[in-house]
Amino acid sequence: MVIFTVGCNFQCEFCHNKHLLQNDAGRGYQVSELLQKIKLNKLVSSVSITGGEPSLQLDLIEVCEGIKKMEKYLSIDTNGSNPNILSDILKYADRVALDFKSPLIPRRLKKVLGVYLNEARFRESFELLNHKKGLDFEIRTTMVQNLHTIEDIHQILEFLIDNHFRGTYVLQQYQYNEGVGEKFKDKFQKPEHHTLITILRPYVSKSRDFKIYLRDDIEGYELIENIVNKIE
């Protein structure tokens, strides 16, 4: 089961869930009502909470606690801006997917996020998640042509190597859909398949503690080593 929360503290123009950025989007649930829906559906073995930005929800911890008591696998998506909330979530989460949207350089963060982010908060979130034993930890970057540069992705990957990241990194290909909004249709483009491979290829031979996957319209979701081996 996937639960979408409303609201976000970022203003990424390439966001494909802009309809969730309004606080009156969707419908409201009491925690008890939501937990009952999960409990009564015997087909649900895992729950993913995404958004928007879930850590903005005041009752998120209560929901996570309830899901964990049902012994369901719990996954949380986050932008990493609220490390204090993540610290509490880690008592219950089995998996966390962290969006690493930009190198931790103020001017690049502001350009990609559309708002100011204190990079220390993101670093704290990263360290917290990376040191949690037994956590399925994924970091992902959606590369957007005309917004991200190749150097942006290299800087993110070098940060992960230097800071001993031990999870899974996914480089995602931006693809326009109607959720992005018609006025942004021509502003951003999809990076080419060969561009993404060119970026990731050098890391096949680099020493690192994490796996690297490419997600795009050609490969679907595949380890970069497998992609390079097919080419060569």
Image: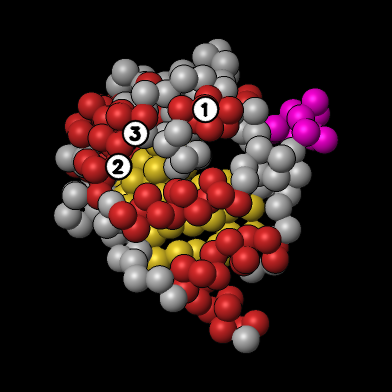
Percent across and percent down for residue 14 are 65, 34
Residue at 50%, 76% in the rendered image: 225
Name the residue that disc number 1 marks: 107
**CA distance for labels 1 and 2:** 20 Å
Identify which amino acid the numbered label 1 is placed on.
Arg
Please say if the residues under marks 3 and 1 sit with CB atoms less than 8 Å apart: no
- Please determine whether, in this image, residue 35 is positioned above or below residue 213: above
Q: How crowded is mark 3: few (under 14 residues within 10 Å), some or many (20 or more)?
A: many
Residue 76 point in image, percent of width and height: 36, 41
Residue bearing mark 3: 122
Q: Residue 126 carries which label?
A: 2
What residue is shown at x 53% (from left), y 79% (from top)? Answer: 226
Q: Earlier in the sequence, mark 1 or mark 2?
A: 1
Q: Tell me the quadrant of the picture where the C terminus can be found.
A: bottom right
Label 2: state its secondary structure.
helix
Point out the image quarter for the N terminus. top left
Magenta-colored stretch includes residue 183: yes
Q: Can residue 48 be seen in this view?
A: no
- Looking at numbered disc 2 in the image, what kind of residue is underneath it? Phe
